[in-house]
Image (spheres, rainbow, N blue to C red):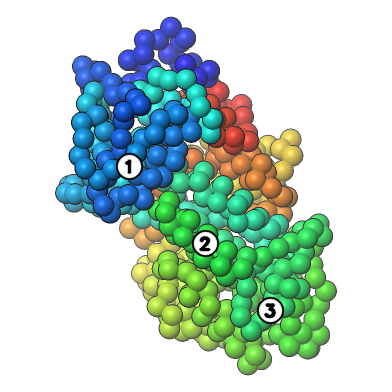
């Protein structure tokens, strides 16, 4: 038994109790879990196959890719039905399960994951992973047995949007580092990754016709490091990699503020025609595109057009926050020109909630990042029909320190321990914003102090699963005592995955 994963049961717990316990330790908490106390368990063997419908082969191959290294089994992915298989079935499920819901049934004779779409099958597969021993996540061969408790799980998400954000502008993260994060967040049914691609400290995506954005603007980062950027081919590969894991990339180019990297790259984007030096600090609010120059809008048009071409997802994020040197009339003037550019691409505009000052189209999504539970701007937008994405900084910002001794992160929104990240209700958090107006939740991870994957993991885990559960699980399952126990069971899994997580003293690891 993995040390620490089932401490509540004691070392002498029978195998059946261990398996049943895993069924009740899934994160995010499923809608319903019904153990079959008389059905025994399914055990993976050398003869097990993964049987899939034709439209589910990709999900089957991803599952096999997780299970093969640790078990040493071949686990071929086949399209015929067999006894003793893990079966991924695209077919009828009750309408309430929607497009991402699934039914997972386990008995001695096999595992059946059934869903209407491959997205639902993918979600079911992430649950199945957590029903297996934690060491199944290892990249090297381990000793079995590989058992799954008998029973049935019926599950579907509370909110359509369950996001994480990674700031690759303050510090650049390579495509492989982003892929590593994608693999980690997929386990907890996160379905959007918001990439903050440009800021004062760096520009990270190629734009044809504006090569100095990456050649010069992408050449540094906070602290003066080498920076970096994604070629269009690399970005398309990230989009494809994410899509295979049921994750949609949301690209963000913040504007009209947070734009020093662009202003330093092209003098003509500045009102005085003089390019400022590159910036490697962390202060904000000092930069702005020139609102009255036509070249500003040619530049923005090119950026938006190319981002839309790179992104099959529905959203383009335009930032709009902390534009402290842009007057409100100029801010409104700017976005009055820019919002129609987004609509012309067929995308929906997203932005930090300050962009509501400019009255985006009703299809626009406002990302709330305030530290209080009131915002007249956000409440008015919700009443007008805009959807709200919840990211309160004192709850959902993964870059906030856990406590005063945390070696990484910032603390301007306060310290955020695991219970802080978990103990809030996105559907009733902001006054006069009903749950019907809430698109979902997102956990931003800003990178002023983060330089590598270990840093990302230390700040994201164990808090990201808390935000993931708020986004997926029904509010009726919300229970801190249950969550901290289930979270403790993730520790051995993260160890097997090589995740450098923070061992919060709140959790009984």
Q: Quadrant of residue 36?
A: top left
- Residue 493 in view in this figure: no
The residue that mark 3 highlights is 211
Query: Compared to 109, does 61 lie above or below?
Result: below
Residue at 67 percent across and 44 percent down: it is 455
SS of the residue under disc 3: loop
The residue that mark 1 highlights is 77
Task: First in sequence, mark 3 or 1: give its number.
Answer: 1
The residue that mark 2 highlights is 237
SS of the residue under disc 1: strand
Image location (x, y in percent) of residue 108: 23, 23
Characterize the local packing of mark 2: few (<14), some (14-19) or many (20 or more) Cα atoms within 10 angstroms. Answer: some
Task: First in sequence, mark 3 or 2: give its number.
Answer: 3
Query: Compared to 408, does 508 lie above or below?
Result: above
Q: Which is nearer the eye, 454 or 366?
A: 454
Foreground mark, 3 or 2?
Answer: 2
Residue at 47 percent across and 16 percent down: it is 1
Residue at 55 percent across and 51 percent down: it is 179
The quadrant of the rendering that contains the C terminus is: top right
Residue 313: assigned label: none
- Residue 242 in view in this figure: yes
Cα separation, mark 3 vs mark 2, equals 20 Å
Foreground mark, 3 or 1?
Answer: 1
Task: First in sequence, mark 2 or 1: give its number.
Answer: 1
Whether residues under marks 3 and 1 lie with C-beta atoms below 8 angstroms apart, the answer is: no
SS of the residue under disc 2: helix
Total tally of numbered discs in the picture? 3
Characterize the local packing of mark 3: few (<14), some (14-19) or many (20 or more) Cα atoms within 10 angstroms. Answer: some
């Amino acid at each position: 038994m993995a040390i620490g994963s089932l401490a509540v049961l004691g070392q002498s717990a029978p195998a059946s109790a261990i398996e049943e316990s895993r069924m009740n330790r899934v994160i995010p908490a499923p809608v319903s879990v019904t153990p079959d106390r008389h059905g025994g368990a399914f055990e993976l063997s050398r003869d097990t196959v993964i049987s899939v419908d034709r439209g589910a082969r990709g999900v089957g191959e991803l599952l096999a890719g997780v299970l093969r290294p640790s078990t040493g089994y071949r686990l071929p992915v086949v399209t015929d039905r067999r006894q003793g298989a893990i079966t991924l079935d695209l077919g009828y499920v009750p309408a309430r399960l929607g497009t991402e819901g699934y039914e997972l049934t386990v008995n001695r004779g096999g595992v059946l994951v059934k869903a209407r779409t491959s997205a639902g099958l993918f979600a079911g597969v992430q649950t199945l992973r957590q029903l297996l021993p934690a060491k199944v996540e290892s990249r090297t061969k381990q000793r079995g047995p590989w058992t799954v408790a008998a029973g049935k799980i019926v599950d579907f998400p509370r909110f359509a949007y369950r996001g994480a954000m990674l700031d690759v502008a303050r510090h650049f993260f390579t495509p492989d580092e982003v892929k590593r994060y994608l693999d980690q967040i997929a386990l907890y049914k996160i379905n959007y990754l918001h990439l903050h691609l440009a800021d004062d400290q760096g520009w990270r995506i190629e734009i044809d016709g504006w090569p100095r954005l990456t050649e010069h603007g992408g050449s540094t980062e906070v602290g003066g490091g080498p920076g970096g950027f994604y070629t269009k081919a690399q970005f398309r590969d990230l989009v494809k990699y994410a899509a295979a894991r049921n994750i949609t990339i949301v690209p963000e180019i913040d504007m009209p503020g947070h734009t020093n990297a662009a202003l330093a790259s092209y003098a003509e984007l500045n009102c005085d025609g003089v390019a400022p030096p590159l910036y490697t600090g962390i202060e904000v609010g000092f930069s702005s595109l020139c609102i009255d120059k036509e070249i500003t809008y040619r530049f923005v048009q090119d950026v938006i057009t190319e981002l839309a071409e790179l992104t099959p997802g529905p959203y383009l994020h335009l930032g709009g926050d902390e534009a402290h040197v842009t007057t409100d009339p100029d801010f409104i003037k700017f976005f009055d020109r820019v919002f129609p550019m987004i609509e012309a691409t067929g995308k929906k505009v997203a932005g930090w909630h300050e962009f509501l000052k400019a009255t985006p189209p009703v299809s626009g999504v406002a990302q709330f990042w305030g530290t209080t539970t009131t915002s007249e701007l956000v409440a008015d937008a919700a009443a007008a029909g805009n959807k709200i994405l919840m990211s309160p900084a004192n709850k959902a910002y993964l870059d906030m320190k856990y406590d005063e001794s945390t070696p990484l992160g910032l603390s301007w929104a306060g310290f955020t321990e695991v219970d802080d990240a978990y103990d809030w209700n996105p559907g009733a958090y902001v006054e006069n914003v009903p749950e019907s107006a809430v698109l979902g939740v997102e956990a931003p991870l800003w990178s002023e102090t983060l330089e590598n994957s270990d840093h990302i993991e230390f700040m994201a885990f164990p808090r990201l699963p808390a935000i993931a559960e708020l986004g997926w699980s029904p509010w009726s399952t919300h229970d801190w005592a249950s969550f901290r126990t289930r979270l403790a069971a993730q520790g051995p899994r993260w160890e097997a995955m090589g995740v450098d997580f923070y061992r919060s003293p709140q959790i009984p690891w």
